[in-house]
């Protein structure tokens, strides 16, 4: 099972217009929850869902007056640094989304890989 706990930076597209977001996710077993801050007037939302293997499904509810529940589904990359999929507001709209782990995690991963490569070369 993939582990998605941490901070993610992403984009979703609504009618081909991109909106950036930052998500903080917490996973315990298959259950996941967290918050998303959109770079739009809608602002912050809470999410709840599940991770099964490399598949993710969650619902997003904004803390503002927007009463829509948005359903997200997608897949998680094997190295657990990238997710992508589709979102849907039943009967209204849908689009695609993607996210990658935040820069701090990516930098740590790059440093780990470089250290591993140096140990193999020296080894």
Image (spheres, grey):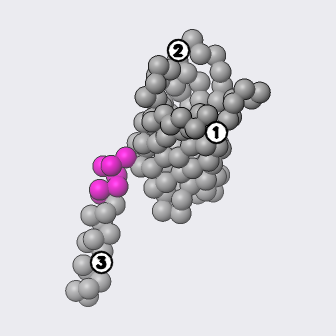
Q: Which residue in the structure is indicated by mark 1?
A: 95
Q: Is residue 120 magenta?
A: no
Contact between labelled residues 1 and 2, with CB atoms less than 8 Å apart: no
Determine crowd level at label 2: few under 14, some 14-19, many 20+ residues with C-alpha closer than 10 A.
few
State the residue in front, 13 or 81: 13
Contact between labelled residues 1 and 3, with CB atoms less than 8 Å apart: no
Q: Earlier in the sequence, mark 3 or mark 1?
A: 1
Magenta highlight range? 102-108
State the residue in front, 4 or 75: 75
Q: Which residue in the structure is indicated by mark 3?
A: 117
State the residue in front, 52 or 44: 44
Name the spot of residue 3 as percent of width and height, x first: 51, 52
Badge 3 element? helix
- 51, above or below 115, in the image: above
Q: CA distance from mark 3 to mark 1?
A: 39 Å
- 91, above or below 27, in the image: above
Instruction: Kindly identify the residue that appears in the image at 48 percent across and 34 percent down.
Output: 19
Q: Which residue in the structure is indicated by mark 2?
A: 64
Badge 1 element? strand
Name the spot of residue 28 as percent of width and height, x first: 54, 44
């Amino acid at each position: 099972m993939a582990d998605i706990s941490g901070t993610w930076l992403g984009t979703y597209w609504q009618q081909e217009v991109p909106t950036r977001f930052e998500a903080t996710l917490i996973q315990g077993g298959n259950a996941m929850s967290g918050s998303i801050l959109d770079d739009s007037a809608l602002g912050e939302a809470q999410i709840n869902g599940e991770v099964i293997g490399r598949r993710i499904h969650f619902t997003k509810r904004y803390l503002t007056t927007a009463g829509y529940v948005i359903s997200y589904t997608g897949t998680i990359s094997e190295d657990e640094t990238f997710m992508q999929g589709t979102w849907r507001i039943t009967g209204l709209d849908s689009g695609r989304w993607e996210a990658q782990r935040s820069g701090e995690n990516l930098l740590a991963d790059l440093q780990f890989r470089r250290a591993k490569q140096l140990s193999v070369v020296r080894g």
